[in-house]
């Protein structure tokens, strides 16, 4: 069902400082930058092979990343798996009783379609499914 690791999402307090740090540390340049209002994030993607590192800053305190930063501080926020058919995977997870955040796919960045499964269903790891456009 999974075709790749699409991205690793990392929550940061200061997006510009984090971008600068990755640039200095790894010589990488952002490949994409987008504010996804629906998710309450401003994000920067660095391409690594066929996957991305996704730096995430919150657009406000009452957003998933805003709450995460307040509660846990900066760090790995979720893992995004690339899938060929997001509806099929969601249907399967629901069938086997995995708790979902999103029963229906919604728009992600880069024109992708995404859906989240709850961390309590994956040993404390927030899981995102990503279907490319
Ligand atoms: N990873 C692991 N555990 C997490 C978590 C995360 N990212 N975020 C919250 N939790 C834990 C909390 O610590 C809490 O654990 P305890 O019950 O042990 O204290 C539990 O999940 C429930 O937390 P909560 O505060 O009651 O719930 P929240 O309101 O923080 O919501 C979640 C949690 C996962 C449902 C919410 O963050 C969500 O809907 N996420 C999906 C959307 C999202 O994350 N968007 C931003 C990224 C966008 C992108 O990648 O493009
Ligand atoms: Co993500």
Image (cartoon, rainbow, N blue to C red):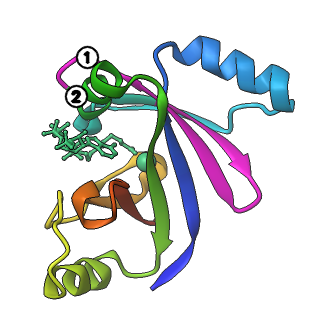
Q: Is residue 84 above or below residue 58?
A: below
Q: Are marks 1 and 2 in contact (CB under 8 Å)?
A: yes
Q: Secondary structure at mark 2?
A: loop
Write down the quadrant of residue 16 in the picture.
top right
Residue 5 x/y as whole percent: 58, 65
Q: Residue at x 36, y 30 (%)?
A: 41
Quadrant field for ligand 1: top left
Q: Residues within 10 Å of mark 2 (few under 14, many from 20)?
A: some
Residue 132 seen anywhere in this rendered image of the structure: no
Depth check, front residue: 94 or 35: 94
Q: Which residues are magenta?
A: 43-62
Residue 60 numbered mark, or none? 1
Residue 31 seen anywhere in this rendered image of the structure: yes
Residue 68 x/y as whole percent: 30, 30
Q: Residue furthest right?
A: 27
In the displayed structure image, the side of residue 92 where residue 56 appears, left or right = right
In the displayed structure image, the side of residue 52 where residue 75 appears, left or right = left
Q: Identify residue for label 2.
A: 63
Q: Is residue 77 above or below residue 118?
A: above
């Amino acid at each position: 069902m999974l075709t790749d690791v699409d991205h690793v999402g990392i929550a940061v307090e200061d997006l510009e400082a984090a971008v600068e740090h990755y640039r200095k540390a790894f010589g990488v340049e952002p490949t994409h930058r987008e504010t996804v209002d629906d998710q309450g994030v401003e994000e920067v993607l660095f391409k690594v092979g066929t996957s991305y590192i996704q730096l995430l800053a919150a657009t406000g305190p009452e957003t998933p990343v805003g709450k995460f930063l307040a509660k846990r501080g900066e760090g790995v926020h979720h893992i995004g798996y690339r899938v060929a058919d997001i509806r099929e995977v969601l249907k399967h997870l629901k069938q086997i009783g995995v708790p979902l955040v999103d029963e229906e796919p919604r728009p992600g960045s880069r024109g992708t379609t995404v859906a989240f499964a709850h961390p309590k269903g994956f040993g404390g790891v927030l899981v995102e499914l990503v279907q490319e456009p």
